[in-house]
Image (cartoon, rainbow, N blue to C red):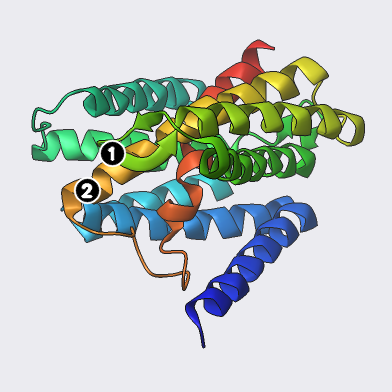
Amino acid sequence: MSETLKRTISGIIYIVLLLSATLYDVLTFKILFGFFMVVAAYEFARLINLSKYLCVGISLVAVLAIFQSAIALPIHLLVILSFLILLAITAELFTTRKPNRSLPVKIIIFLGYVIGTFLAFLHLPYTATGYDPQIVIGILILVWTNDTFAYIVGKKFGKHKLFERISPKKTIEGLVGGIVFAIIASLVLNYFFTSLNVYIWIASAIFVGLFGTLGDLVESHFKREAGVKDSGAIMPGHGGILDRLDSILFISPILYIIFQIL
């Protein structure tokens, strides 16, 4: 089987799985992304040379917590802490100094970059009336639109490198193009998905473009440190769960905060 065909088939299966689990029921949504969290924890442990047993164990506890309604997670506090940790990780992109990778720092990074972001994402589709899959589907569409058109615009018109040291192919033109088309997609979504108002959809599109790109750069940063091309191999032709969800996870704490404010 050719690499292109393998990549196409696994990509279709991934999208169908995402959409069907999200749309069918809140339980299937939690099961799928709970599984993704555990796999991502294992992948990230390998990337930063942290105990796989520790990371997977913590992720299993987090998964258990999201299935137990009796456990009231301090989600606001967890999301804010995760956001602050993401900012600290992002700051590493702007220095050539070797980052601090002591054991306590690695654990803090893991909690913010994997556990905190997954918990934020899992709490995005809740409104005053309960679980609303439109929110997740809308965010996924914005991310896919941004990624697709950032690539197309960057390939066609890209001349100015965005962050060549970390990701040589990304361009400023691609970044702007991705955001513009994501905003257009948000206006279309506003007509079909009425859970959020137009201002939240537009704000989401802008932050998806900005922080989704940062998320991609941060994951590339970790992979360069580890000397690997992909975070894992669970998806043939696409790499690991972190390779597929890096943008979505990175923007989740920001979107959660926006949804609370607006």
Q: Residues within 10 Å of mark 2 (few under 14, many from 20)?
A: some
In the image, which disc is placed on residue 132? none
Disc 2 on helix, strand or loop?
Answer: helix
Q: Residue furthest top?
A: 261
Q: How far across and down, in percent of the image, does residue 146 sit?
A: 61, 38
Pick the front one: 183 or 22: 183
Name the residue beneath numbered marker 2: 224
Q: How far across and down, in percent of the image, does residue 239 sit?
A: 41, 64
Q: Quadrant of residue 151?
A: top right
Residue 148 appearing in the image: yes
Discs 1, 2 touching: Cβ within 8 Å = yes
Q: How far across and down, in percent of the image, does residue 236 sit?
A: 46, 73
Disc 1 on helix, strand or loop?
Answer: loop
| Residue 204 in the figure: left or right of residue 114 | right
State whether residue 6 is above or below residue 241: below
Q: If the image is split into quadrants, where does the C terminus sit?
A: top right
| Residue 81 in the figure: left or right of residue 247 | left
State whether residue 204 is above or below residue 137: above
Is label 1 or label 2 in front?
A: 1
Q: Residues within 10 Å of mark 1 (few under 14, many from 20)?
A: some
Residue ID at (67%, 42%)? 145
Q: How far across and down, in percent of the image, does residue 34 sit?
A: 51, 54
Residue ID at (63%, 45%)? 144
Q: In which quarter of the image is residue 157?
A: top right
Question: What is the spatial separation of the Cα atoms under label 1 and label 2, in whole angstroms?
Answer: 8 Å
Name the residue beneath numbered marker 1: 166
Residue ID at (41%, 31%)? 214
Three-letter amino acid code at disc 1?
Ile
Pick the front one: 168 or 43: 168
Three-letter amino acid code at disc 2?
Arg
